[in-house]
Image (spheres, rainbow, N blue to C red):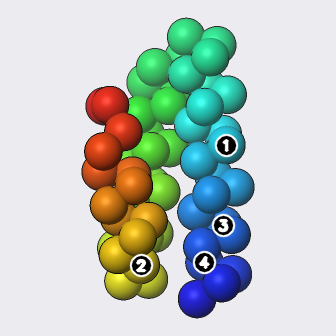
Amino acid sequence: MYIITFIIFKELNEVYKAYNRADYPTALEKLKQCLNLARQAKNQQAIGSLSRLPA
């Protein structure tokens, strides 16, 4: 569980980097990947946090 959470938040860092570069399609795609990982891991805290991000 902790490894999956680490991977999710590591990928979330990539979302922020893409967003800050104004690469919105990449940011959105990576955000969707993070959300899917959180759902697969059944990590309710990550799902809630990711679901509140603007997309």
- The residue located at (63%, 52%) in the rendering is 11
Measure the alpha-carbon separation of dots 2 and 3.
12 Å
Q: How crowded is mark 2: few (under 14 residues within 10 Å), some or many (20 or more)?
A: some
For residue 26, side relative to residue 51 (left or right): right
Q: Position of residue 49 (x, y in %)?
A: 39, 55
Residue under numbered circle 1: 13
Residue under numbered circle 2: 43
Three-letter amino acid code at the position of disc 4: Ile
- The residue located at (64%, 13%) in the rendering is 21
Contact? badges 4 and 2 (CB < 8 Å): yes
For residue 38, side relative to residue 19 (left or right): left
Which secondary structure lies at badge 4? helix
Three-letter amino acid code at the position of disc 3: Ile
Specify which label sits upstream in the sequence, 4 or 2: 4
Residue under numbered circle 4: 4
Residue under numbered circle 3: 7
Measure the alpha-carbon separation of dots 4 and 1.
14 Å
Three-letter amino acid code at the position of disc 1: Asn
Measure the alpha-carbon separation of dots 3 and 4.
5 Å
